[in-house]
Amino acid sequence: MSETRELRVGHLYGSLLNLYGDRGNILTLKYRCEQRGIGFVVEDIGLGKTFEPSGYDLLFVGGGPDREQQRVADDLVDLKAVPLREAADSGQVILAVCGGYQLLGHYYREAGGEELPGAGVLDLHTEHPGDQARRCIGNIIARWDEGMIVGFENHGGRTRLGPTAQPLATVEVGYGNNGEDDLEGARQGNVFGTYIHGSLLPKNPAFADYLIGLALSRRYGEEPLAPLDDSLELRARAVAEGIARREHRRKSA
Ligand code: GLN
């Protein structure tokens, strides 16, 4: 009998960067671990706190409006950037959604023109074209290595990837990183960024398990995850996909 495994999650700015239910990603990781008898612990790493990367198997940061990103920007650079880069360099799993994703790059120029420094973990930058510009809002379908990801996006910022970052997925319906290059999100090593809220993981169980498997394998070695009954998750995903495709057809008509 293999040792009882446990997933230790560090949740950055959980009370500040939690737009459109991004906390649902934490709940999904918890559910999908505990259904398999895998332990789960989560710790909020908020303002004023730094952290020791080796204490976690997976780090998560959600999205937020420009004003919340401004609130965390200095703290991110002063207290989080170095351990985040250390975590990324060691192959730790990091998942960042929208505003959190933008702040893992080199910088985020928010709608008012202020350039917020990023953690420099992902080779990308993001610029918001201003409050008068069209926002990237709507349901999104994107294709990643293992299949389809569905969700919801709402961001003004336009993200451009540098040469070291790979896209996480390609956009099938929706805007993605910038509404122009059909790229969605970013991946560098085991660092994953995405614009997909919804929240992301509940309706994308294969992606959730991919992240859990990656995180646990670093600490316990490769061990397949027992399958779960995902009938409800997949029904929700089919509904989300149908809404996204109908919305796309209506917009294209
Ligand atoms: N404030 C950022 C933008 O508008 C991120 C928004 C978000 O996290 N949904 O692009």
Image (cartoon, rainbow, N blue to C red):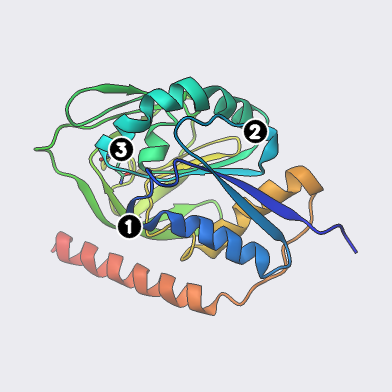
Secondary structure of the residue carrying tag 3 is helix
Mark toward the start of the polypeptide (1 vs 2): 2
| Position above or below: 146 against 99 | below
Question: In which quadrant will I find the C terminus?
Answer: bottom left
Q: Position of residue 88 (x, y in %)?
A: 60, 31
Q: Is residue 200 left or right of residue 19?
A: right
Mark 1 and mark 2: Cα distance apart in space: 30 Å
User: Which of the labelled discs sits on residue 56, or is there none?
Assistant: none
Location of residue 33 with respect to 133 vertically, above or below: below
Residue 18 vertical placement versus 208 (above, below): above
Of the pair 193 and 74, the residue shown nearer to us: 74
Q: What's the amino acid at mark 1?
A: Phe
Q: Which mark is residue 152?
A: 1
Residue under label 3:
68
Asked if disc 3 is less than 8 Å from ligand 1, the answer is yes
Provide the residue designation for mark 2: 53
Residue closer to the observer: 91 or 43: 43
**Within 10 angstroms of label 3, few (less than 14), some, or many (20 or more) residues?**
some
Kind of residue at badge 2: Pro
Q: For the image shown, how many numbered marks are present on the structure?
A: 3
**Between 82 and 179, which is closer to the camera in this rendering?**
82
